[in-house]
Structures are given as C-alpha cells and as structure tokens.
Image (cartoon, grey):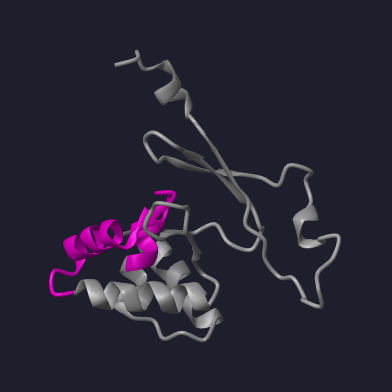
Amino acid sequence: MEHGMATDEAERLRAVGLKVTAPRKAVLAALDGHGHLDADTVFERVRGELPTTSLQAVYGVLAALTGAGLLRRIEPAGSPALYERRTGDNHHHLVCTKCHTVADVDCVVGQPPCLEPADAGGFTIHTAEVTFWGLCESCRSEPAA
C-alpha cells in the first residue's frame, strides 16, 4: 500500500471518530476499487496482509466501518451481504440474475426522488435502496446451454 493511501485511510478513520488500526486499514484497502465484496472475500484479501486475523474480526471491522459511514452494506436477495466503498450518494444497484455481478447505477432522475415517497407514514427517510435485476452483457452474450 502506498504511503499516501495509508495516510488518507488514517485520516478518514480519525474523521469519523475511529481509532486507526491495521485491520481497519486493511479492510478499507481490500475494498478499494473492488466494487461489491462479501465478508469472506474481504477476509481472504485481509488475511494476505494480516495472516493472524480472523473472520469474526473482519465482520467486526465491517460493522464498525459501515456504522461510521465509510462503507455501505447492501443485501441483494439470495446473496450474502456485500460491502462497498461508495457511500453518501444514495446510488442504486444492478444485479445479474445469472452470475450475480453487482454494478452501481446513479439515481435515474439525477436526484434521489426515492427519498420523498408519496406518503412517508410519519417516518423521516434517510436512505432508499433500489435494485434492478436482469442479465449483464456478458451473460446475455453466452450461448444457451
């Protein structure tokens, strides 16, 4: 990991009131630029850098980073929870029903209209999740079995 990246991660952790620890920095690095990963995949990536870490420790770090707003957790139906670095913009997701690839998609209208339901039933809305399901380009171009 570059020294500059390590400094940025440390600053992000401090900015949200979290202590800077090797496992937290390793989890952030594992997710950096890798889209949507489940906890097992994050664990495998972290274990390469921190061989003595445990899956339970990674789950704890994922929960802390999600709670602090540094990660976003999504739970597409039929899939384990996935974590991503893109936060704070209420974007949505495309999920391939064949290969389970997940891709980000910006809000269709350019603003989060889904945060203003016709009737909020007394709730104050802070997040909405929209998931589009279909076949990715790769799966559509595969010959039928």
Identified at 54% across, 81% down, the residue is 16
Reply above or below: 65 against 132. Answer: below
Residue 73's spot in the image, x, y percent?
A: 48, 64
Q: Residue furthest right?
A: 118
> Is 102 left or right of 69, judged from the image as shown?
left
Question: Residue 54: image x %, image y %?
Answer: 19, 74
In this rendered view, identify the residue nearer to me: 106 or 95.
95
Instruction: Depth check: give the residue in front, 35 or 101.
Output: 101
Question: Could you tell me which residue is drawn at 44 percent across and 69 percent down?
Answer: 9
Residue 69 in sight here: yes
Q: Say whether residue 52 is magenta.
A: yes
Q: Quadrant of the C terminus?
A: top left
What residue is rendered at 81% in x and 78% in y?
Answer: 122
- Of the 4 image quadrants, the one containing the N terminus is bottom left
Near-viewer residue (4 or 81): 81
The answer to whether residue 3 is above or below residue 124 is: above
Image height check: is 42 above or below 141?
A: below
User: Which picture quadrant has residue 50?
Assistant: bottom left
User: Residues in magenta?
Assistant: 27-53
Q: In the figure, is residue 69 to the left or right of 27?
A: right
Numbered-mark total: 0
User: Residue 34: x, y in percent?
Assistant: 39, 49
Q: Is residue 112 visible?
A: no
Outermost residue toward the top? 143
Coordinates of residue 22 in the picture (x, y in percent): 29, 76
| Residue 33 part of the magenta segment | yes
Relative to 134, is 10 on the left or the right?
left
